[in-house]
Amino acid sequence: MAAALLPYAFILIPKYAMAFLTAKRIHNGYNWLPTGSVIELSNDGVIISVGEEHAHKATFYDGFLCPGFVNTHCHLELSHMRGVVPEHTGLIPFLKTIPTHRNDHTPEQKRLARLNAYEELAGNGVVAVGDIANTTDTLDVRAMGKLHVHTFVEAIGFNEARAEAAMGYARQTLEAFATQPIGISWLRQSITPHAPYSVSQRLFNSIGECNESGVLSIHNQESAEENKYFERKEGAVADLLHGLGIDDTSFVPSGKTSLTTYLHWLPQRLQYLFVHNTFTTAAEIAMAQQYCASAYWCLCPNANMYIENRLPDLDMLMQNTSNICIGTDSLASNKQLNILDELNTIKLQYPGIDWEILIKWATSGGAAALQMDELLGAIMPGKRPGIVQITNNKATGLPNIINKIV
Ligand SMILES: [Zn+2]
């Protein structure tokens, strides 16, 4: 993409015509910089230099500075469902509740909830979001220009006979996003499968063929029941499909897990964003990384705790990949949209994972997963990542006070 077409960061006019920033510690999106490092910013938020010069004129910030966060998995269109579904029900009861309640609210209630959620993301230091859409509801928030957005338009349809109709609806929805006037932030979109148990083989094939953006996102192995269904066509997923009146007669169980099965229905040339991965094994990660042009593994820890009360095995994940990123999922399965709180949830359960790694996942990891690393995710000359200051909450001792600087 030509430099002239690069979008502005989420705030156009920083507080200073040109700024020099320093802090106790600075994380550049990959690692901690040497003590005393100074960031030089242009008047539109572009990093000019990072080094130890200009210390005498730099503004000192308490806590630490890092690039703006990238939230790689959210559903802004479900924001009105905050608190509707009880916690710890498990995925299948959760999935039964969503269709029953997603239309309980008026269009105005939904609109206000979306706007609030969008502001919540931006206020919590997020600069870009990978946002799932089943409708065109989020056209309004995309136009606000505070966040870069990749909208993943979900195709859903497990009945083979309905594949063309499902694809037609997804194409129509995609078209509405694709023809939205371009504003000051990146607005991108692609059609993506919802989950292995809600997309037929034929629909997987069509989605793969039409995806030109290079990034394909999918809810992957969020529940053990998903694997059971693919292996033996039984269990709670079978009950869910039958309960919803979905004809699954064309599905033949593969005797293998979901990921091992559906991935081969999709092209190798794409970059994949696997979301949740709560029940994904080391062998499957290795297989996917060999198969896909590139593979990113998105963690949504608070949503995992909310629904299944279990996190993926992060020690195993870290041994097998460094392509990890963070999402909040929707307000239907999270109390807030706050990437730093997601990191705190991981830190509480995995105290051995350094903040240096956690911040990397939330910044450069997410930017690469959404193919926005040309501009975002790193405090390096030429990029315009947004900069946030993080300080500790005195009551909890956890870093959770977020102040957007640019
Ligand atoms: Zn989700």
Image (cartoon, rainbow, N blue to C red):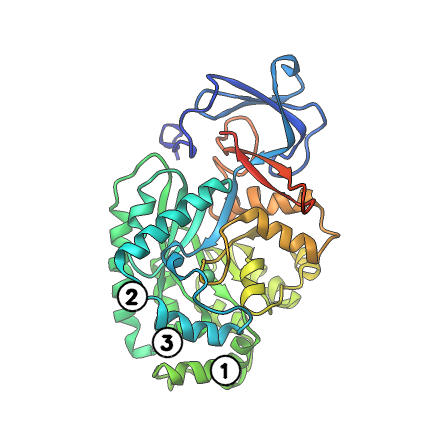
On the image, numbered disc 2 is attached to which residue? 167
Give above or below for 216 relative to 67: below
Label 1 residue SS: helix
Q: Find the distance from the CA under tag 3 to the CA under tag 2.
A: 12 Å
Identify which residue, 208 or 89, lies in the foreground: 89
Q: How far across and down, in percent of the image, does residue 99 sit?
A: 36, 71
Q: Tag 2 or tag 1, which sits nearer the N-term? A: 2
- Does residue 379 appear left or right of residue 318 in this picture? left
Q: Find the distance from the CA under tag 1 to the CA under tag 3.
A: 15 Å
Note whether residue 90 is visible.
yes
Which residue is depicted at the point 45% across and 58% down? 330
- Does residue 23 appear left or right of residue 100 in this picture? right
Label 2 residue SS: helix
Q: Find the distance from the CA under tag 1 to the CA under tag 2.
A: 26 Å
Mark carried by residue 110: none
On the image, numbered disc 1 is attached to which residue? 236
- What's under tag 2, amino acid-wise? Met
- What's under tag 1, amino acid-wise? Ala
- What's under tag 3, amino acid-wise? Phe
Q: Tag 3 or tag 1, which sits nearer the N-term? A: 3
